[in-house]
Amino acid sequence: MTTDAPPSPAASPEAARTARTAGGRTGAAGPGRTPADTGRRRRRIRESLTGYLFLAAGILCFALFSWYPIVRGLLLSFQQVNFTEPARWVGLDNFQRLFEDPLFATAWRNTGWFSLLALVFGFAAPFATALVLNELRHGRTYLRMTVYLPVMLPPIVTMLLWRWFYDPGPGLFNNVLETLHLPVQQWLESENLAMISLVLVSTWANMGTTTLIYLAALGAIPGELYEAAELDGASIRRRLWHVTVPQMRFILMITLLLQVIGTMQVFVEPFVLTGGGPDDATVTVLLLLYRYAFVYNDFGLASAMSTLLFLVLGLFAGVYLRLTRTKG
């Protein structure tokens, strides 16, 4: 009679572990899974669901406060709407009425003129200010704060302050001119000076942010480039043109496009300081849009104007995205 040999002591623990593993894999966790794997999977599912819920909330808010107004505005541009009577579909009549309005061309011409003047003053002034601040060794932090201070002021406060500056009677600018024995000016009442006056206000109020951007870009330029230019005998003007500008070309282009997009939407300055006058010399696109909606109570016409402005700004935004994607 033969009997099986007892298992060796070395093989018994391994067999026991194999049996326990096999038993665990055939349990409630499912075939091929351990309870630890199941717990990790459930934890990942919970984390994913939490992330998707937060993402859904953000998308919902964005759709409610951004996409819906855009779509609603596009629909209103093809309707006759005053919110007192039922909306009536009129097709392209609103756009035809826009082109027939003499103020339509005037508003676009004034807006283009404002943008051009803003580029002349508002594009050069922050760059020059950043160059000066970058060369300073003492008081740089204080001066940076001083330059950025106008950005932190509420726009209406800025406008009221400059209205006093431009006051033809006790205004600051005319008092300075009288002290220098120069003729006083009707800053906001003159067709020739009104737009330039608005550009000066806009430049002073908004140049702080652009100046800080330029300062950060200047700080990123390697100092070795300036040292090499100095050793080659380059003057300050040549170092600026051949070192600073090429190294900041991308930043300068981006701020240029953003400034064009921003100045095309000018509203607060003419609304508060001139009301579009004198003789409609400072009526801008957004100011005319405001009149259509809240003065003439024609929201369909205002929506048509906003649609045209959306298309024009969309072209500049497309160029901006193309440049940033190419740089990336």
Image (cartoon, rainbow, N blue to C red):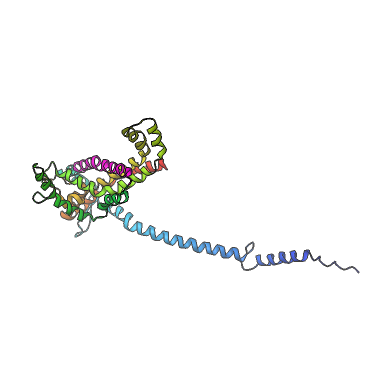
Q: Is residue 134 magenta?
A: yes
Magenta stretch encompasses residue 269: no
Q: What is the x, y in percent for residue 279?
A: 11, 45
Q: Which residues are magenta?
A: 108-137
Identify which residue, 148 or 179, lies in the foreground.
179
* Camera-side residue of 282 and 5: 282
Secondary structure of the magenta portion, mostly?
helix
Q: From the viewer's side, name the closer residue of 274 and 5.
A: 274
Is residue 188 visible to the viewer in this orientation of the structure? no
- Location of residue 177 by image quarter: top left
Residue shown at the point (61%, 66%) measured from the top left: 35
Say above or below: 282 vs 156.
Answer: above
Residue that protrudes farthest toward the front in the picture:
138
Count up the numbered dots. 0
Q: Residue furthest top?
A: 232
Q: Quadrant of the N terminus?
A: bottom right
Name the quarter where the C terminus is drawn.
top left
Residue 142 shown left or right of residue 302 in the figure: right
Q: Residue at x 27, y 55 (%)?
A: 152
Please indicate, yes or no, whether residue 268 appears anywhere in the rendered image. yes
The percent position of residue 95, horizontal first and vertical second, equals: 22, 46
- Decide which of 216, 269 is in the foreground and name it: 216
Q: Quadrant of residue 215?
A: top left
Q: Residue furthest right?
A: 1
Q: Position of residue 83 (x, y in %)?
A: 21, 59
Give the residue at x 68% y 65%. Answer: 21
* Image coordinates for residue 284, horizontal then vertical, percent: 19, 46
